[in-house]
Image (cartoon, grey):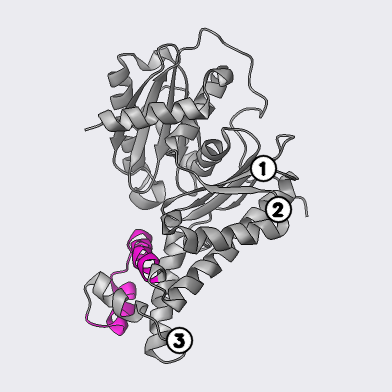
Amino acid sequence: MKRDPLVQLPFPFAPPASRPGARFVMGIDGGATKTTAAVLDLESRVLHLAQRGPSNEDAVGAKRAVQALLEAADAAIEQAGITPDELAAAVLAVAGIDTGAIAENLRKARNESWIVVNDVVGAWATATGARHGIGAISGTGSNVLGVGTDGSVWRVGGWGHLLGDEGSGYWLGIESIKAALRDREASGPETALTAAAPEFFGLPSVEALAAFVYAKPLSKHEIAAFATQTELLAGRGDAVARELYERGARELSLQIAAVVRRTGLQGVFPVGLIGGSFRAGAVFVEPLTAAVHEFAPQAHVFVVQMPPVAGTLLLAARAAGRADALETEELSRLIDTALDRAP
């Protein structure tokens, strides 16, 4: 079966021709909880940052998603004291299954030729500095993207909570509720999740929670939020909660393995982990690292500390022909400074 990549980079992997005069670039990270826009002056090295509401189309719909993206962009552009026409390039990385719909709605709302990519492209750029390697997201959902040394691109995951999201916050949340139900009916091992689940959702029992899940119904974000309790109980040694993280690590490693195979990555290369699920720390990161090292023993697996908007700025600088003007270490400092200034 012939398989084409599910995601393309917005421009060739090799940097476009240099444009020394390009000065202002904008990057936007649009997620399920917030939208972060940043405008960077490549000459003065000043970064202007603004945050607005969620812009994941799956969560809030296309109209509200585009509104949040434009509000965040306008606020960052205004802080920079420029007009949209002065942007040499802008890259928007948006969570959700159909980023094409967001791009189409943006074009209807505005005339700017901004580049819209899936959020996993921004995550990859943040994790690797827009170089070869892999970015793996585990937040509310999960998604993995890698680029080989020859520029080959492969994405795995990103199908949403009904068809995928293995190893994500949603997956951990729903599997935790299932584990609590199995404990309640005595078909599975005992776990503190059985008491934690109804308490978290303000219900009298885990069987009441089962009815609530169907009757309300609970959104994927509400279910993903319960993973914070799984994390807490895993840290306290609950065997079932810990095993869920181990299973989640195996599921996510299968996605990473497919990316490694399809891109031909070998030897030493980065596998950057991005998303709230990795705040669980060693209980998740260690089994995932061990699983990745089974098929890529020299891979450098690490939790990315920079926010995802960094990747969109790196991509915007590359699109503007200024790829050599921005290093990840400096960008990290600029973003930290901007976040400290933010109200």
Nearest the camera: 247 or 9? 247
Q: Which residue is mark 2?
A: 296
State the residue at coordinates (46%, 77%).
239
| Left or right, 256 with reference to 26 | right
Look at mark 1 in the image and give the residue it sits on: 269
Q: Is residue 184 above or below residue 281?
A: below
Q: Tell me where residue 105 sits by quadrant.
A: top left
Q: In this rendering, is residue 140 above or below 172?
A: above
Real-space Cα distance between discs 1 and 2? 9 Å
Label 1 sits on a secondary structure element that is: loop
Query: What's the residue type where badge 3 is placed?
Result: Pro
Residue at image location 40% in from the left, 40% down from the top: 30
For the C terminus, which image quadrant?
A: top left
Report how many numbered discs are placed on residues in the image.
3
Marks 1/2 in contact by CB < 8 Å: the verdict is yes
Q: Which span of residues is magenta-colored?
A: 204-233
x, y (%) of residue 137? Answer: 51, 50
Q: Residue at x 72, y 36 (%)?
A: 149
The answer to whether residue 303 is left or right of residue 73 is right
User: Badge 3, how many Cα within 10 Å: few under 14, some, many 20+?
Assistant: few
Which residue is identified by label 3?
189
Gap in angstroms between the C-alphas marked 3 and 2? 34 Å
- Asked if one can make out residue 305 in the rendered structure from this viewpoint, the answer is yes
Q: Label the magenta part by its dominant secondary structure.
A: helix
> Of helix, strand and loop, which one carries label 2?
loop
Does residue 228 belong to the magenta stretch? yes
Q: Amino acid at mark 1?
A: Phe
Would you identify the image quadrant in which residue 38 lies?
top left
